[in-house]
Amino acid sequence: MHIEKLVEQIKKKKSFLCVGLDVDIDKIPTHLKDLEDPIFEFNKAIIEATQSYAVAYKPNIAFYEAYGIQGWKSLEKTIQYVNKHYPEIFTIADAKRGDIGNTSTRYAKAFLESMNFDSITIAPYMGKDSVEPFLAFENKHAILLALTSNEGASDFQFSEKEEKQLFEQVIETSQTWKNAERLMYVVGATKATHFKKIRAIAPHQFLLVPGVGAQGGSLQEVCRFGLTKDIGLLINSSRGIIYASNQKDFAEKAGLKAKELQEEMATYL
């Protein structure tokens, strides 16, 4: 998807909401578990309930890999459903891949070509030759882990060299790579005060922001420091939306939660 189409959707829906489809079969409503493909049926219902408010969907691949080949089938059916019925919605394979040369190329083909996701999350630790294969696909995007919201983020991401912290070096160096205009970055909402630094290095690129809500991140603070003229933010919410209820009204409650976030986002636009 060309980035202009994503911006167009954001402005049309007055939303920059990304719904994380992190499906744990132990948490979905009991009445779905007897169906042939409960994971897909759960996703389908969530998508239908939230598509008016969401501009992106992000399945975390681990939640599908955990169920073996059936999980992969559910994932494939999910992305096919979104692409067929809501092709204007941006899709993210939250796979956190990253390996050298031909291996990265194969990962890229798997998610960006075979499954036809619009983007994939990438771990940058192995450097340029592990990321550029993902950037070779026209109108596809690589979302680089930059500053995360987990407890262990401080183990490495704030290490300093020449008065720059590692997360700053990652963003700055990646800007020099081939097709860097196709890069986006993962920046945790719990690190909102660092958005000003990040915007100084990457003023135009989209930031995928987890951590709002359940992890304690503030949407207001993220918008204060992170918004650009083209919005430049995708705010992800997973558990807070998809598990708003574990009863037969799960989809309806998910839609209401998504609507709440969309309405708050609209005030910042």
Image (cartoon, rainbow, N blue to C red):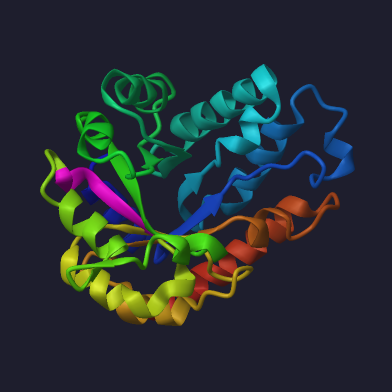
Among the 4 quarters of the image, the one containing residue 146: bottom left
Decide if residue 103 is in sight here: yes
Q: Position of residue 70 (x, y in %)?
A: 69, 20
Q: Position of residue 261 (x, y in %)?
A: 54, 69
Quadrant containing the C terminus in the rendered view: bottom left
Q: Position of residue 38 (x, y in %)?
A: 76, 31
What residue is rendered at 30% in x and 41% in y? 142
Among the 4 quarters of the image, the one containing residue 234: bottom left
Q: Position of residue 192 (x, y in %)?
A: 40, 76
What residue is rendered at 43% in x and 42% in y? 92
What residue is rendered at 55% in x and 35% in y? 61
Among the 4 quarters of the image, the one containing residue 33: top right
Decide if residue 232 is in sight here: no
The stretch of residues the image draws in magenta is: 180-186
198 to the left or right of 38: left
196 to the left or right of 245: left
Q: Is residue 115 magenta?
A: no
Give 100 or 223, whichever is nearer the viewer. Answer: 100
What residue is rendered at 88% in x and 28% in y? 34
Quadrant containing the N terminus in the rendered view: top left
Q: Is residue 184 magenta?
A: yes
Residue 33 versus residue 190 in the image, above or below: above
